[in-house]
Image (cartoon, rainbow, N blue to C red):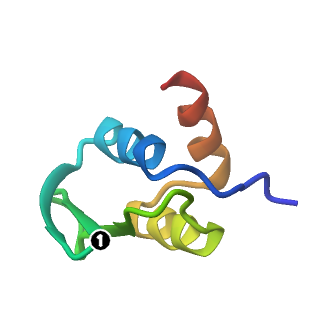
């Protein structure tokens, strides 16, 4: 098991901001964050719980491993 669980969107937003991303815009219920070195923006829905597959896709985009992600979540 990878240790990933669904997470509230506000907690994931804190994680993304911790990594240096900035809020770009909101389209519908999707929040879009940008960072200079990323090829694509980080996008996630403003649902109560963000599904694991969205977390995993955004981690891949950010170049963060699951273990690094879990360690950062402990600190914020």
Q: Residue at x 49, y 69 (%)?
A: 60
Kindly state the secondary structure of the residue where label 1 is placed: strand
Q: Nearer the viewer, residue 41 or 9?
A: 9
Quadrant for the N terminus in the image: bottom right
Give percent across and percent down for residue 40. Answer: 24, 76
Give percent across and percent down for residue 34. Answer: 18, 60
Q: Nearer the viewer, residue 1 or 51?
A: 51
Give percent across and percent down for residue 37. Answer: 19, 60
Q: Residue at x 59, y 55 (%)?
A: 65
Q: Nearer the viewer, residue 64 or 16?
A: 16
Mark count: 1
* Residue 74 image-quadrant placement: top right
Work out whether 73 lies above or below 76. below
For label 1, the crowd category at 10 Å Cα-Cα, with few meaning under 14, some 14 to 19 and many 20 or more, is few
Work out whether 76 lies above or below 2. above
Q: Residue at x 50, y 54 (%)?
A: 64
76 left or right of 67?
left
Task: Read off the residue under disc 1.
Answer: 30
Q: Nearer the viewer, residue 4 or 45?
A: 45
Q: Residue at x 45, y 48 (%)?
A: 12
Residue at the limit of the structure toward the top, as seen here: 75
Work out whether 21 lies above or below 36. above
12 left or right of 40?
right
Work out whether 33 lies above or below 74. below
């Amino acid at each position: 098991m990878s240790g990933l669980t669904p997470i509230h969107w506000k907690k994931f937003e804190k994680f993304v901001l911790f990594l240096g991303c900035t809020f770009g815009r909101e389209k519908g219920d999707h929040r879009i964050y940008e960072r200079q070195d990323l090829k694509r923006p980080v996008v996630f829905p403003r649902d109560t719980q963000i599904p694991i597959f969205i977390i995993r896709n955004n981690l891949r985009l950010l170049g963060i491993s699951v273990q690094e992600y879990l360690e950062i979540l402990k600190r914020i």
